[in-house]
Image: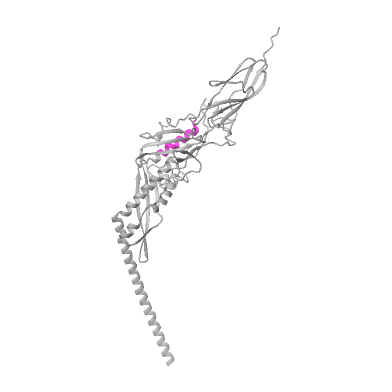
Amino acid sequence: MVFQSRRSQITVFMIIGIVILAIFGFLFFSSGQQTEENLEKRIDIAEEKIRETNILRQYVTLCLKNSLQEGLILAGKQGGMIEAPQEYAEFEGYKVGYGIRKQEPTPELPGPPEYPCINKPGTPSYQCGAQNHIMNPKKPYPFGKRALPYLCDPEGPNAAYLKIFPFPCPIGTYGRGSLQEQLNLFVETQLPRCVNLTPIAQITGLNITSAEPNVSVVWGEEDVTARAAYPLNISLEGYGSMRFFDFQVTLPIRMKKIFGLADYIAKNEIYDIEFVSQSDFTDYRYFMKQILPLMKVSEYCLLCAEGEHSSIIEINDSVSVIEGKPFVFRFAIENRIPALDPIQYVDVTEGDTILIELIAYDADNNDIISYSVSGWKENEWAFTGQYLEYTTQEGDAGDYEIIVYACDQANECDWQTVGINVDPIAEEII
């Protein structure tokens, strides 16, 4: 009986102990919960103070604007690339990326002497071996390949399928590695470097650190907008809470129109050998609307620079102002091979003068084409205007070949082998 009584007492004590622990646990939890609620309220007050003082907004907005401007200027002067491109033409201290590269020979697009022909049945351009001319009628041919970066992120805020903005990017300017994606990353990287949170921490008396911001660049019709979601981690007495602040800046840069014009010029520079960038863009329409006021397009030849044989296309938009100056977008064009029109087989008689008309074109507007010849009588041919001339003599009878070259100032040449037959003078029958 005594043993049972003691067991009963122990059981009662255990129950009482459990109850006491539960009470203390509840009180501790309630106390902790109240502490967290109090800290959360204090952080709420700090957040309001941050918003009311406007210091954070001033810092982030200024940084956002400067970063956006810096990224746009670099992209404009480096061919749409914020990071300096690996292959470039140097101009005014900047590494200008190529918007058009030289077309390397392929089985479908062979090099000289077949160049420029397309080795593909049914094409409206040259058929390899055909004796037709570039301009009669004009034949489309890829005198180079487009290398401009894309303008828009296919899944970004200007994506056409989203239907958020009434005017999406120009057709063909969506793709990975776009200028839009480059700007997002550039501004996101710059923001933590140029925002000083120390004064804000001093005002609030709290520990404030920033997390990774999220930046979204939006191409408008007449401007560029950068939106930043800037997260701050506000902590007090070991308790932290993440708060989000949204910022936005807009610059009057008509990037969609500027890039659309650059893309238009690049496509025409490739497929129209007579296209002149400085003047032939003036009837261009952007989404069926004329761009007004017109932008200025200039071309600079780098043939005089050491080791350079490229040209620079520059678009200057007086309406798009950045840091008090008109915005400039440039891209480089790699030097391309001139195109020599087909030369017909020559059939003459001794004593006749051979006249070979030389017609060649160069897609690079500033290049001067020179002609030369090798092979039969190579030192006796004369160049008179657009003609290669030689007067045959007695004893010249026979079948021969010469090679005619059309070269630009960078010594890029197209060439053709020309067959020549010289018949002997018929003997008079007495």
Q: Is residue 53 left or right of residue 142?
A: left
In this rendered view, identify the residue nearer to me: 368 or 287: 368
x%, y% of residue 216? Answer: 40, 49
x%, y% of residue 50? Answer: 31, 57
In this rendered view, identify the residue nearer to me: 158 or 36: 36
Q: Which residue is at 33% across, 59% downward?
A: 201
Q: Is residue 173 within the magenta segment?
A: no
The quadrant of the rendering that contains the C terminus is top right
Q: Which residue is at 42% across, 51% downward?
A: 189
In this rendered view, identify the residue nearer to me: 5 or 146: 146
The quadrant of the rendering that contains the N terminus is bottom left
> In this picture, is 388 found above or below 5?
above
- The image quadrant of residue 74 is top left
- The image quadrant of residue 278 is top left
Numbered circles on residues, count: 0
Q: Which residue is at 44% across, 91% downward?
A: 3
In this rendered view, identify the residue nearer to me: 260 or 386: 386
Give the farthest residue toward the left: 52
Q: Is residue 309 left or right of residue 208?
A: right
Residue 271 can be seen, yes or no: yes
Q: Is residue 266 within the magenta segment?
A: yes
State the colouring used for the structure image: one colour
Give the farthest residue toward the bottom: 1
> In this picture, is 405 found above or below 259?
above
Residue 132 can be seen, yes or no: no
Q: Which residues are magenta?
A: 258-272
x%, y% of residue 152? Answer: 43, 44
x%, y% of residue 368? Answer: 51, 28
Give the farthest residue toward the top: 430
